[in-house]
Image: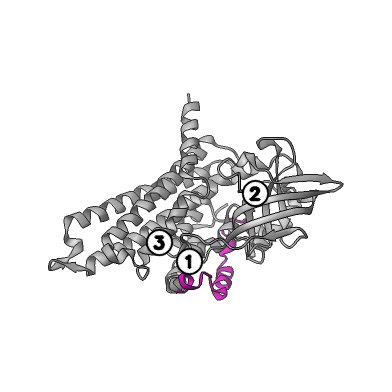
Amino acid sequence: MALDDETFSLLLDSVQRFVRERLVPAEDAVEEHDEVPADIVADMRELGLFGLSIPEAFGGIGLSMAQECAVAYTLGQTALAFRSVVGTNIGIGSQGILMDGTAAQQAEYLPRIASGELIVSFALTEPDAGSDAASIKTRAVADGDDYLITGSKRYITNATRAGAFTLMARTGGPGAGGISAFIVPAGLPGLSLGKPDRKMGQRGTKTCDVVLDQVRVPASHIIGGVPGRGFKTAMKVLDRGRLHVSALACGMARRILDESLAYAQQRKQFGQRIGDFQLMQAMLADSQAELLAGWSMAQAVALRYDAKPPGAADAEVSMQASCAKLFSTEMVGRVADRGVQIHGGAGYINDYKVERFYRDVRLLRLYEGTSQIQQLVIGKHLMRAD
């Protein structure tokens, strides 16, 4: 699926204008109040941002992976809290239903997800299970035509906004084969939320624990209708998610570099612009070169992702998506560090955007699989290669 070039160009122009005219001016308010304004969320719905990756047949826009990366790159050039509002609907919250859900599940949920009427969160991580996702302890016990789900989920993005959760629970024995993916509506008896997390950065994003105590969910809410396939579903959505985050990281690197260049052009020391000093130019050059490398990689892998049959497994694409995620998220950390250095003492002050962006980008190396998990994916693939 993909939009034709002309239509996509118009969409991308609209998103770029939205970022420039609506989101960037609202960054300080989000930082101060730790909240994305409701009128901006409404504008996101109107623009179709909640349904970027969902096919037109379900009311979405139906972007290809390469097109989604271009939009993510644009959204990455402002406070990351804005993208977080729509992120779970575009990615890990919806893609399991789209890729593996039954026709009835897709028809019931995807149109509401695409419109932004329904915010859906992805609930996998637990207090004792993060990178080791196969060790989750949340258990779903069969009870007639239902399952009773008990356990705790941690750091769940958009949990306070969510109307439903794509939630992983153990229906069978140990290991990945015993995990099933459920669609769990919010507000069910026994489901509660913990207090909002106070984070290092990304103010305006919402994460908290999700606690389940004998939550009754119909067996028909198992994604795909077959128990024991949840871990495979979770892994299938990661390639797309990792490429999205790669593009997001590159967009933020672009914004930080722009902020740093502007400061270097106007700040004077020793009678001249600091950007005229070679050591400053070296930091700007390194950031530009690494940004180009990361963005080129993300675009190339996205095109390869689009070339494979929909839903088909491709170990090479998975490995390359991990390469893009690893490089781009580590890269933006270095760009942010240089940005602070270029700003000098001002870079340590909250009034300057690079200070908050420095904190914001640190999370990109953790979610959708830590850098160390990406290294393991890449290394194991290489060792299996002939």
Q: Which residue is located at x 64 percent, y 60 percent? A: 194
Residue 366 in the image: above or below residue 319: below
> Could you say where residue 139 lies in the image, as x and y percent from the top left?
73, 45
Mark 3 element type? helix
Q: Which residue is mark 3?
A: 357
Q: Secondary structure at mark 1?
A: helix
Tag on residue 15? 1
Answer left or right for 306 relative to 21. right
Camera sees residue 162: yes
**Upstream in the sequence, badge 1 or badge 2?**
1
The image position of residue 78, as x and y in percent, is: 43, 65
- Name the residue furthest bottom: 39
Depth check, mark 1 against mark 2: the one in front is 2
Mark 1 residue type: Val
Query: Please, is residue 381 above or below residue 179 in the view?
Result: above
Residue 92: give x, y in percent of width and height: 59, 52
Identity, as a three-letter code, of the amino acid under mark 3: Phe
Marks 1 and 2, Cα distance to the nearest angstrom?
26 Å
Residue indicated by mark 2: 96
Name the mark nearer the viewer: 3 or 1: 3
* Closer to us: 79 or 248: 79
* Amino acid carrying mark 2 in the image: Gly
Check the image and report above or below for 58 versus 374: below
Point out the stretch of residues depicted in magenta.
29-56
**For the stretch drawn in magenta, what is the main secondary structure?**
helix
Quadrant position of residue 40: bottom right
Image position of 17 with respect to 289: above or below: below
Q: Earlier in the sequence, mark 2 or mark 3?
A: 2
Q: Please state the horizontal and vertical placement of residue 83, each as a whole percent of the image.
A: 51, 62
What residue is rendered at 43% in x and 74% in y?
Answer: 25
